[in-house]
Amino acid sequence: MITTSDLVSAIIDALAARQDKTPAALRTELEAGGRELPVDSILIAEILTDIEARYRIRIAADAEAARSTRSVWTFAETVHQAIEDSDH
């Protein structure tokens, strides 16, 4: 079973690939912003379809999903919930 922590790593990997950075370097940058790993929501939007395809899920286009794009951790939690919902 995939964990939220696994998803955080996958999201950081996807973001790093788009920015031509190593995942470790990007994680260090994000950690400097705080525990939630705040990120520009536009960056999350750029990898959204990649994450949806990888985990065969759909993230609803609603206010809750929009709020989740403000940090890597909250986005990972949203993805995790979508995975759990799709398994039922």
Image (cartoon, helix red, strand yellow):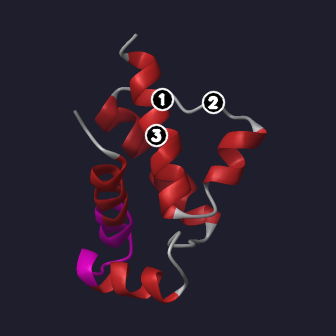
Residue 32 is tagged as none
Q: Say which residue label 1 marks.
A: 82
The C terminus sits in image quarter: top left
Residue 79 is tagged as 3
Q: Is residue 50 above or below residue 82?
A: below
Name the foreground residue: 2 vs 39: 2
Name the foreground residue: 54 vs 80: 80
Q: Per the image, is 40 magenta?
A: no
Which residue: 56% across, 64% down? 71
Which residue: 35% across, 34% down? 53
Q: Say which residue label 2 marks.
A: 60
Marked residue nearer the N-terminal end (3 or 2) = 2
Name the foreground residue: 53 vs 55: 55
Distance of mark 3 from mark 1, alpha carbons? 5 Å
Q: Residues within 10 Å of mark 3 (few under 14, many from 20)?
A: many
Which residue: 70% across, 52% down? 67
Which amino acid is tagged 3?
A: Val
Which amino acid is tagged 2?
A: Ala
Magenta segment, which residues? 13-24
